[in-house]
Image (spheres, rainbow, N blue to C red):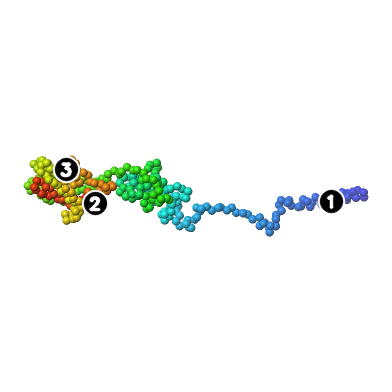
Amino acid sequence: MKPNTKSFLLFLSVWFLVILACGPSAAVPPTLTVTLPTETQGAVPTQPAVLEPTATATPLAENPTATLTTESQDSIPQDTATSPPPTATAGPQCLVLQNLNFRAGPGLAYREPIGFIQKDTVVIPTSYYPVGVPGGSWVLVNDQGKDGWIAAESNFIDCNFDLATLPSVEVDPPPPPPPPSSVQTSDAEGGCGPENGNPECVVTISDDFLIQFQLFENGQELTAENGVKQISFEVRVGAETGDTLYETIESTSAYCIFGGNERCNDWPVDGNTYIWPSGIPVSDGTYFIEIVSIYKDTNFRWAADFEIKLP
């Protein structure tokens, strides 16, 4: 029996050693689950994302002039209009500062406008007129495929170059302006008419030629061939006692204040401005017109007040 006991004890000892050899390795946690000490966790800081600012990212609170409207963002403020509106790499350009009429020629005389150009439009002038008709400076531009003229003063456009460097171009003269309107505002005075023993006076008033004077006797028109020596016209400012503005003498028919033969001459025009033949520009107002005729050896007059207005 003893030998068997020894063998059994030897077997138990070997089995116990096997268990001890395997036990420690099974008790050790996997290396993947081991955590680092607390003081080493901050050695690898996390980097936050950074957004690069743009030139237009200024908050409205820091830029009180900024607005959310498209017009203000795309236009140049009025207080910076003295600097060239286009970019430094742009060619010769002008910024339209006001809504402007677009005309067929350089000046207000070119009626009617053929369109208009809106404020804040950038245009490229191709020609320059320093003095248009009747005045002002003008530039030729192209808008949506159509050539036309716009006013060129500094309160209308702002350019990044000297407009005087542009070439000139020939333009057609403007159409004649509408004539001044003429209205007789008082009863005629004077010695015309058979009741005074004189020929009958016939006065024709027209916006085109102002006044034509005719004499009739027994239904026949009188001229130089049958005794009319002369017809004189005088225009005074305001009233009969006013300063003489213009006077003329006609010795042949038709007897007109601006002359003429078979028909009266129209109002004289100088550079699209109506003038009296004396060279003085016509202005709105009241005028006194006196006509004195010499027929054979008799003088008689016709006179009345007129109101003349420019178109």
Say which residue appears at 33% left-offset and 43% top-offset.
171
Which residue in the protein does label 3 denote?
Answer: 254
Query: Is residue 271 found left or right of 51 in the rendered image?
Result: left
Name the amino acid type tagged 1: Leu
Viewer-nearest of discs 1 and 2: 2
Q: CA distance from mark 1 to mark 2?
A: 139 Å
Query: Is any atom of residue 150 visible in this view?
Result: no
Name the amino acid type tagged 2: Ile
Q: Secondary structure at mark 1?
A: helix
Which residue in the protein does label 2 denote?
Answer: 280
- Choose between 240 and 222: the one closer to the eye: 222
Say which residue appears at 84% left-offset and 49% top-offset.
15
x then y, percent, for residue 135: 32, 50
Which residue in the protein does label 1 denote?
Answer: 17
Residue 34 numbered mark, or none: none
Q: CA distance from mark 1 to mark 3?
A: 154 Å
Query: Is residue 180 found left or right of 142 in the rendered image?
Result: left
Query: Is residue 9 found left or right of 111 in the rendered image?
Result: right
